[in-house]
Image (tube, coloured by chain):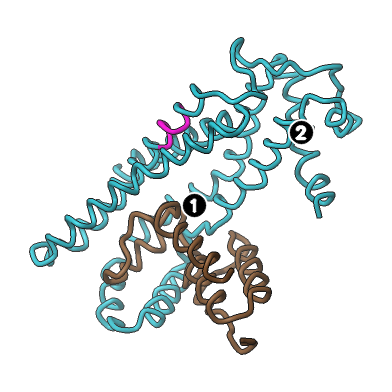
Chain colours: A brown, B cyan
Amino acid sequence: MRGIILKLIVFYQRWLSPHRFFVKGQELRIEEYFISSSGCRFWPSCSEYAVICFKEKSIYQAFLSVSWRLLRCGPWSSGGVDMPSIQHKNQ
Amino acid sequence: MSNLFNQLLLTPFFSVLVFFYNTVAFGDFGVAIIMLTFLVRLVLSPLSYKALRSQKEMQELQPKLKELQEKYKNDKQALAQATMDLYKLHKVNPFSGCLPLLIQLPILIALYQVSIKGFSSEMLARVYSFIDQPDQINSISLGFIDLTKKSWGLAIIAGFSQFIQSKLSLTKSVKIKEGGQKDQVKSKESALDMQNMMQKQMLYFFPILTIVMSTSFPAGLPLYWIATTLFSIGETLLMKRRTRK
């Protein structure tokens, strides 16, 4: 299950995300990351955040944290560096 | 949960659609969908406009960004933090976040619901009571598109407009890249070739996916997708023209 979810997220990052034209593994061009077509308010991006969550937390908790992150990701929040808290690690 | 979704999204969307259908769309449900799409995008457009306005300020911050990049070469998190601080200090806030993307989902689900059962009396009973209820909704739009049936023609148009939109956003990002990497271009030529190839693949993938998805849904959905993509294309073109000045 965890593997499928992670594969889906990576699939999204690679083929669908507005950031898909930026190739991973190269040096981080931070201004591109923030300015491009749907510029991120947060760092790491929601999908990277989700990858960390689903790797580190139980699926249920990861789902909750990712949903909460997505809800915060809009003009109503100030953004910034926002790493997932992994103190509730279950497994 | 589904009840909440119906209350919060399906009923309002459908009511607005029926209202448009009754009035400005002259009894054409397809036109009503297009109008609703444009309305939603117009409401969201200040976000894109804000992004455009802060792009100029961003350019002035460019030298400072370069310094930060040099300083935090090996620490992405610190770099992100420092960049954010710099933007905040200069009150630049161009990031719209996931909202423009996420908003698509509930709209698509609502439209899907409307398209598969939208023309039954069960759905019509949902419409707010202060809106006139038509006895029946004509599912034929523009004289030849049946919104409740699948349509290859609309699917292909949706894919094609998606392709143009992808192409527009691609040239934009490549330009930024060229500007930034001028001094290192030679050593990275092969990497850039690889990158170009991958970008080409990505350019075609989304439009093709759009076509495949569109052919499996009632024509109301590709119609929405075409309308929203055309709006994006217009917005991108307008932005390009303004930034050139």
Q: Nearer the viewer, mark 1 or mark 2?
A: 2
Residue carrying label 1? B50
Range of magenta residues: B157-162
What amino acid type is highlighted by mark number 2?
Phe
User: Residue at the spot x=67%, y=24% of the render?
Assistant: B148
Task: Give the mark nearer the N terminus: 1 vs 2.
Answer: 2
Residue B14: numbered disc: 2
* Residue B169 in the figure: left or right of residue B95: left
Mark 2 neighbour class, 10 Å CA radius: few under 14, some 14 to 19, many 20 or more: many
Nearer-the-camera pick, B228 or A16: A16
Nearer-the-camera pick, B237 or B134: B134
Q: Does residue A30 appear in the picture of this structure?
A: yes
Quarter occupied by residue B92: bottom left
Identify the main secondary structure in magenta.
helix
Mark 1 neighbour class, 10 Å CA radius: few under 14, some 14 to 19, many 20 or more: some
Nearer-the-camera pick, B182 or B222: B222
